Amino acid sequence: LPPLTYKVVAECSVSKARAGLMTLRHSEVRTPVFMPVGTQGTMKGVLPDQLIELDCQILLGNTYHLGLRPGIETLKKAGGLHKFMSWPRAILTDSGGFQMVSLLQLAEIDEHGVNFRSPFDNSECMLTPEHSIQIQNAIGADIMMQLDDVVKTTTTGPRVEEAMERTIRWVDRCIKAHARDDEQSLFPIVQGGLEIPLRERCVSALMEKQVRGFAVGGLSGGESKHDFWRMVHVCTDHLPRDKPRYLMGVGFAADLVVCVALGIDMFDCVFPTRTARFGCALVDSGQMNLKHQKYKHDMEPIDKQCNCNTCKRYTRSYLHHIATNESVSCSLLSVHNVAYQLRLMRSMREAVLVDAFPQFVKDFMARHFGSDPIPSWIREALSAVNIELPPDASEDQAVNS
Amino acid sequence: MKFIIKSISKNSGRLGHLRIKESSELQTPLLLQTTKGGSIPYLSADVFGLVSREQQVLQLTLCTMDQMAESLDQWNRSLGDYVGYPDYNTLLLLRDPCEVTPSGGNDRDVVPLFTRRGKESLTAERYMQLVTSFAPDVYQGLCDADTNPESTKKRVQKSVDRTERFMQHCFKQHRELERLKDSTLLAPIVGGYNTFARTQSIKHAREQPKGTYGGYIFEGFHTNGIAATSLNPSQLLPIVDHCVQQIEDELPRLMPGAFTPVLMLELIRLGVDIFDTSYAYCAAVNYKALTFSYCIDKEEHSAFLDVTDEAIKEQFTPLLEGCNCLACQKHTRAYIHHLYKTNELLGPILLMIHNLHHYMGFFDVIRDSISADQLPALLDYVRHQNMSTDINYCIEPNNKTVGKAAMGKGFITAAN
Ligand SMILES: [Zn+2]
Ligand SMILES: [Zn+2]
């Protein structure tokens, strides 16, 4: 059996949304899926058993961080990351390249790989496509990413095309270096900046490679949302139907809903756990900053509908007092926030299964934006896949007056 | 609160039953769960549920929770419920035994409360107001406990006099306040290391009509935090013994603080009934897993495993072989060492899980030993761990910071 099989279980009859089943060596993953980020081999203050209780099916690990600590020798001796961190379900790793470029000074990319200064002795070092794969083979994640040529999403001009072409060349080097193809699946990454023809060329070049799924990269880095959704749209238009599609680094609730409508299956984002550290809980209407004085005497749970252990036992009032003061608050809010993301994905999947996804999207947007106007990019993106949102209340008024 | 003594032995301490409100019967010697801001440190209630399914008593501290008083005024369920433990009983202390309490600030009519937001000066009136907001099942009386082995005679006398004054108010209010009619008051005994002062302090409490308070809390022996782990037993034990001799057998005695396992056993032998888990916490935050043995065997054991130790970097074995806590069942020394190096929150979580589990197991064995009249044998075993010298159970502050050197080099290839 291949290490990854994917089948579309249901498709929305209106939009490009789909429900799928991805079978990996460590777990079955029901898509669309959100992957919480466990950067250093742990998800911020949450035990593996708690993640399983939340029905988390796949976690993301960061190759750059894991390569530094504990390091590949230790990971090899441990028998891979699953065993090292006692996580029995699926793991996906990134290539390490993006983290280097965003975290390290002096990271530069040439045809060989990513040049950088070692964070511990400042010596000149390089991460090549081959090396990234070696590390990811040692980590042993179910899904791994190719090393890609990363440029800022706002970059324009020939550098974008160069990065796209180089990314395609590097896929071959990664495939060649991949030593555990019977256990781990390597995803190439669609690049091409904010230019539709480049994205199209990249997708068609990558579709010639022997791979079991695709990632869409180079987005979610500060580009305009109007560009963002168009790039996702063009990629999903051309990517094969029978393989999973992973949109890297996207995780705000409204973005998740739009991108599922555009046909994306997998997402990851540090936001749910990062915002937990600052005392913020995710709810349908956005974020609830529990540090706000208005929650001081609020004896309701964060969300009455939520069945996570935090909402079962704790009030907003108590969380208000301990948020950012006691470290346990970070665990409590992370549990709720991950539960929120996973539940959102589950409800989208269920909506697709009964072909009620467009209505789900409309209801969600109404809850999410309330009386605020819905951003035009969301209207346009959804309209591109035949979901027409009702006009904003304020637009009505504009028309009437 | 109801306390029934089951057995008293000259050398083996005493066993008892404690029933707080409608709780199930709790066995003494009893271990209270120490908390910060109402939560067991680092552990959410559902994670603590993986450590113990038994009903516990939470030791809440006013200095980490005072900001919640106003909210609690509007809360109509139990204090335990507010902090996520609806089935647990609560006991409210002034100070946090886990952290060193700063000295000073004891003016004539106030006791300082060192909170996260700074120092607040508590009068007896204000204190009883706060207690009323919290409505704990058990609470301590207000006292000046700012004494330690070095305190002067004058300072000690002041702590006794002030405490007497504070307690006149507390006793009176305790009898009168409707909201506290189901709460039990613990009378504080202060007086540093001075037998005369301790006698006076006990006399002040015992002058009250029977039934005014339901137990004693011994204060003023140390000022909390890891300093309690290095108390000198030959100084401490005679004075505790002196106190125990002068109070009635029928009431339970609480002594908060991070005492070493050996000192705790000595105190139990003298007749102290209630302790807390601050030692387990202090070890965890200083990156130590408790590894001392309390199941008598012939092997040598050390007090701790230091998880910052490079030597365990690739030890894929549990913190403590044979331990059936969640941390030891599922995770390795190597992983917990990695969590330390990456400064990840799961590190102290796993250490707390192990240390609490270990310490609760220790208390089970202590109660068994008392009932078998074998406490001295256990004490001797814990003291030596089959080594030729006494084990050092003192917790040193571990201020290690994770530097760049802690990063593995396996990742990096040199540029060519
Ligand atoms: Zn929740
Ligand atoms: Zn253990």
Image (spheres, rainbow, N blue to C red):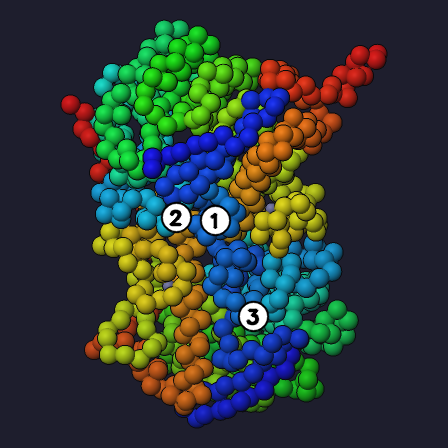
Reply above or below: A67 against B211. above
Q: In which quarter of the image is the N terminus of chain A?
A: top left
Residue B311: image location, x then y, percent: 22, 54
- Are the residues at dot 1 and dot 2 in contact (C-beta closer than 8 Å)? yes
Question: Circle 1 — which element?
Answer: helix
Q: Can residue B108 be seen in this view?
A: no
Q: Name the residue under label 1.
A: A52
Residue B286, compared with residue B177, is above or below; it is: above
Instruction: Identify the mark at residue B78; answer none if there is no mark.
Output: none
Q: How far is disc 3 from disc 1 in space, using C-alphas?
A: 26 Å
Q: Name the residue under label 3.
A: B55
Residue A88 is labelled as 2
Judge: label 3 CB < 8 Å from ligand 2: no
Type of amino acid at the residue the image marks with label 1 = Ile
Residue located 35% across and 82% down the image: B378
Q: Quadrant of ligand 2?
A: bottom left
Residues packed near mark 1 inside 10 Å, few (<14), some (14 to 19) or many (20 plus): some
Q: Which chain carries label 2?
A: A
Q: In this view, does A46 lie to the left or right of A286?
A: left
**Residue type at numbered disc 3:** Gln
Q: In the shown orientation, is residue A218 left or right of residue A139? A: right
